[in-house]
Amino acid sequence: MKIKIINDLNIKKQAEELAVDIWHTPSFLFIVMGVITAVIMITNYYISVNQNRPEVLVISESIIVITIFIIGNSIIESVEQVAKLNKMKSEFVSVASHQLRSPLSAIRWETELLQSKFGEGLTPRQQEAVQTIRSLSGRMVRLVNDLLDVAKIDQGRLALKKERVDLAKIVEETINQCYAQARAHNVDIIFNRKKQVPTIIGDNDRLKLVVENLLTNGIKYTVGKGRVEIGVYEINNYLVFNIKDNGVGIPKSQQKRIFNKFFRSDNIVKHQTEGTGLGLYIAKNIVEQSGGRIWFESREGVGTVFSFSLPIKQF
Amino acid sequence: MEKKKILVIEDEATLQKALMEYLTLDGFDVVEALDGEEGLRMAKREKPDLILLDIILPKKDGYEVLAELKQDETTKDTPVVLLTNLGGPEDVQKALDKGATTYLIKADYKLEEVAAKIKELLKMQ
């Protein structure tokens, strides 16, 4: 019976998620507190109806207060423990990522040196090997940067700069940067830049990261020949960015979880094993912290349109 | 044209060597220091055209070195580029407040881009 209640209320799952004993989960402690309080209140009722003795009533009332106090205290303790664990986890990610950046910088620079300055004697196969190390170390740097961003988001200290941002220029730069990747995936990128759009206030590097994440998703998750269309335009004091692909799409059943940390939908895992499920989580946090909103429409097998809007504010 | 002199203050030997080799092959005269105090001495003695400075350094950290460079008559006008892996906005702000010309994250920049930045700052392009 006890096990059944524990299962029904998902206390076991909560205990696993929070990495604490079942007896320390807030849900379990609340139930215990509720049961004890109910029992004592019923007892109080009987005492007050059947016995005309105020001192017994005072004693049992005191027991309620003490019980609530003790259990309340252990709830606070367990919540504190969870918060502490969470903080330690974020700090660990942050320290580990910083430490990883140094050796990664060294790998990138040494391979760059080998390729660009000492590359003459290398055979084509050796050059290919160096190129592979270079691009993989670049991928590791991006992963480490993503983990650092997630740790900052989780600690509530992702600080964004406030500077003038030309979103159309960011889009053009990102397209140039992703050109080789798009060619490799047989994807055409079209930027519908109709007219001049106003500049906004935001963090250039972070907003570039958002555009980059959305564009590389569009490229990566297109199978066969594809097309990615980007538009930037102004609507009611907002700058709206959208990107439309004819890729694999997001299954309806998984659309709710698409912005969750580490989430990757089943169909994209099949097509593309590379990916961490952090890109959209980071993008959402950056856009929302910049005062904007991010959303999408998608049909599996047809394609996806991702959009975000940012307020146009004057200095 | 006379070669431009770059002082690299960096304690990580591999990074130091990679920077030195790349910049030398790119036509710069490169001098090196492995800690903050040596960096300050070299800056005064060698009078470089530009200084690449790491933040986490033995003996004196990059911020202290930067502050002293900016107080000294012989070095106060030398452009200082902070080259580090600490990339928080607070680190960047602190560096710029103390007078750094610019700030580059090592893991995010290729040697080619570091060299291009140096050339741009020295108006060599």
Image (cartoon, rainbow, N blue to C red):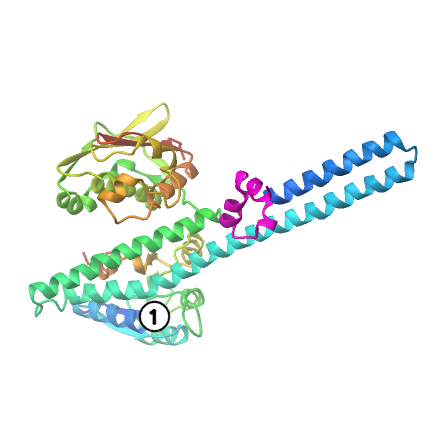
Residue situated in front as seen by the camera: B102 or A67: A67
Magenta residues, start to end? A1-26
Chain of the residue under the numbered disc 1 shown in the image: B
Q: Secondary structure at mark 1?
A: loop
Where residue A78 sits in the image (x, y, percent)?
Answer: 61, 50
Question: In the picture provided, is A238 more to the left or to the right than B4?
Answer: right
- The reply to whether the magenta stretch includes residue A15 is yes
Residue situated in front as seen by the camera: A101 or A28: A28
Where A233 falls versus A271 (above or below)? above
Magenta part, dominant SS:
helix
- The reply to whether the magenta stretch includes residue A240 is no
Q: Dot 1: within a 10 Å radius of its alpha carbon, few (fewer than 14), some, or many (20 or more) residues?
A: many
Amino acid type at circle 1 is: Glu
Where A304 falls versus A148 (above or below)? above
Q: Which residue is mark 1?
A: B10
Where residue B34 sits in the image (x, y, percent)?
Answer: 35, 75
Where residue B86 sits in the image (x, y, percent)?
Answer: 39, 59
Furthest toward the front, the residue is A1
Where B93 falls versus A293 (above or below)? below
